[in-house]
């Protein structure tokens, strides 16, 4: 029976889907058995070159169907695959899995898959940051309405707002890279983490047991392993990992929510392809469906963060099996969802569209109110009284506000000031006082400083970034 998984078949990349596939898992199990055999031979155990070669020749040809049939009989997944592998490798059968416990292949494979998954995600975060940085640079000086409480506030710039999104993603990159760099292998630890079975195999030689652990750890691509573990590696590591991915989801959700809000105002849009249909009933619509999908998937990833906390809290003594089914779902879904989010984030960032005339119209509607303080200051410089000027502005502002709110008219505060004899001393300054570029503060300079001092050093860690477009997976 074919099982349709929306995360892998519809949203995530083929690369990440393979990383969490049965094929990847079970071939990794066999590689770990091979690493253990090679290290044991190197340290003097009775393992032959013929046995090693036999195992190597069957690492990739996993008969998953046969293993599934075996598991249905014996109700143990690792032993089922061990039996199938041993059948394929009759000469090596006596030494496969020697001294190990199921978590030797299970937990170590999980750690390899986590490491590979993080290595898939990190360049995609960097690519998203890179594309948003180019956008921020291009629009660093374009004034736009800022919003607090979703009400018009002081002006900012399109590029400065984009840097808010980038800054969150930089924090996510740092957190996820930190998880990646701090990963440790479970290694060769035995049933309860004491390495007792291996100490017996090596006749009490502690140094050889330690060396066995180091050799296998290195073969698996890790620099170090846990010194202390129970039957499993500490599930606190899963908390660190999924929490970092959930935090990434919050960043993407925030950015895409902003884009959706701006799209509703027709200030900005995500990419919209030539033949794309926005609505089955309303042909004129250009719905922000990429950003909406990001928000939808991000909510799922955010909710996954609680699961590893419960799992870690419920690891009784050296281990309990109620972590297994939960982790199979949570870890895979967390990585697949994060991957899908970054696929879409890259796609959105490479094709954002800005509508300057719409932005300018909104500014002109609100700017007269924002300029009142500048006008007061100019009047005081021209010899006016601050309190009297404030009252004059207050009265005219209320009148203009009524025109906007009650009559649906345009903001005519500037015209009222220009026709008021009280403000005659500054009539020739009004247009200069209303120049939007005088209201954006240091936003352009802040963008330059941010891109140079904080973004560039991170992107330098990823020299392989390209300008290739990322296709939107329908």
Image (cartoon, rainbow, N blue to C red):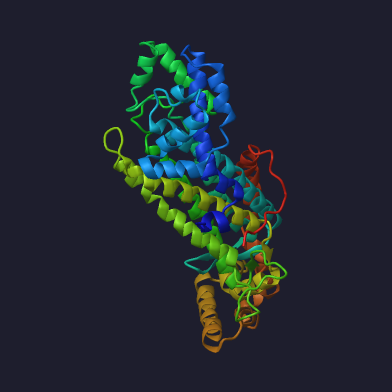
Nearest the eye: 335 or 91: 91
Residue at the image position 68 percent from the left and 64 percent from the top: 353
Q: Which residue is outermost to the left?
A: 317
Q: Is residue 190 above or below residue 111?
A: above
* Residue 3 placement (x, y as % from top left): 50, 57
The residue at 52%/84% (across/down) is 405
Identified at 34% across, 31% down, the residue is 231
Q: In terms of depth relative to the viewer, which is nearer, 52 or 197?
A: 52
Q: Nearer the viewer, residue 388 or 151?
A: 151
Q: Is residue 429 above or below residue 307?
A: below
Q: Is residue 380 visible?
A: no
Residue furthest bottom in the image: 407
- Quarter where residue 421 is shown: bottom right
Q: Quadrant of residue 71?
A: top left
- Image quadrant holding the C terminus, namely bottom right
Q: Of residues 86 and 404, which is closer to you in this image?
A: 86
- Image location of residue 47, percent across then percent down: 49, 16
Left or right: where 391 falls relative to 259: left
Residue 139, horizontal then vertical, whole percent: 68, 58
At horizontal 42% and vertical 23% (from top left) the residue drawn is 98
């Amino acid at each position: 029976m074919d099982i349709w998984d929306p995360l892998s078949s519809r949203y995530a990349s083929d690369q990440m889907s393979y990383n969490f596939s049965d094929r990847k898992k079970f071939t990794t199990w066999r590689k770990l058995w091979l690493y253990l055999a090679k290290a044991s031979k190197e340290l003097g155990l009775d393992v032959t070159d013929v046995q090693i070669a036999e195992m190597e020749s069957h690492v990739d040809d996993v008969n998953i169907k046969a293993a599934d049939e075996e598991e249905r009989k014996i109700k143990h997944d690792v032993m089922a695959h061990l039996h199938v592998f041993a059948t394929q490798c009759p000469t090596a059968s006596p030494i496969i899995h020697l001294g190990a416990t199921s978590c030797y292949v299970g937990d170590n494979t999980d750690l390899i898959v986590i490491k590979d998954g993080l290595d898939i995600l990190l360049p995609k975060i960097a690519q998203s940051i890179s594309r948003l940085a180019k956008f921020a640079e291009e629009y660093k000086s374009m004034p736009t309405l800022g919003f607090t409480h979703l009400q018009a506030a002081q002006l900012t710039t399109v590029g400065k707002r984009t840097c808010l999104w980038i800054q969150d993603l930089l924090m996510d990159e740092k957190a996820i890279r930190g998880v990646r760099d701090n990963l440790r292998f479970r290694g060769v630890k035995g049933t309860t983490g004491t390495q007792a079975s291996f100490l017996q195999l090596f006749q009490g030689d502690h140094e050889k047991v330690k060396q066995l652990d180091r050799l296998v750890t290195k073969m698996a691509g890790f620099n170090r392993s846990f010194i202390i573990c129970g039957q499993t590696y500490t599930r606190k590591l899963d908390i660190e990992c999924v929490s970092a991915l959930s935090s990434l989801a919050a960043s993407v959700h925030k950015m895409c929510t902003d884009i959706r809000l701006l799209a509703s105002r027709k200030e900005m849009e995500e990419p919209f392809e030539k033949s794309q249909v926005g609505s089955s009933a309303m042909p004129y619509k250009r719905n922000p469906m990429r950003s909406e999908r990001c928000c939808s998937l991000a909510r799922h990833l955010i909710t996954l963060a609680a699961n590893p906390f419960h799992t870690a809290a419920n690891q009784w003594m050296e281990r309990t099996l109620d972590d297994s089914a939960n982790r199979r779902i949570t870890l895979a879904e967390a990585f697949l969802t994060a991957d899908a989010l970054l696929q879409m984030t890259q796609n959105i960032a490479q094709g954002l569209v800005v509508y300057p005339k719409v932005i300018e119209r909104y500014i002109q509607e609100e700017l007269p109110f924002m300029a009142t303080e500048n006008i007061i200051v100019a009047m005081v410089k021209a010899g006016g009284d601050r309190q009297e000027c404030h009252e004059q502005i207050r009265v005219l502002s209320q009148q203009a506000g009524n025109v906007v709110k009650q009559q649906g008219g345009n903001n005519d505060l500037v015209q009222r000031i220009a026709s008021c004899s009280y403000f005659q001393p500054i009539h020739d300054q009004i247009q200069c006082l209303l120049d939007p570029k005088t209201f954006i503060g240091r936003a352009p300079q802040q963008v330059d400083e941010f891109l140079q001092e904080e973004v560039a050093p991170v992107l330098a860690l990823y020299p392989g970034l390209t300008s290739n477009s990322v296709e939107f997976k329908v």
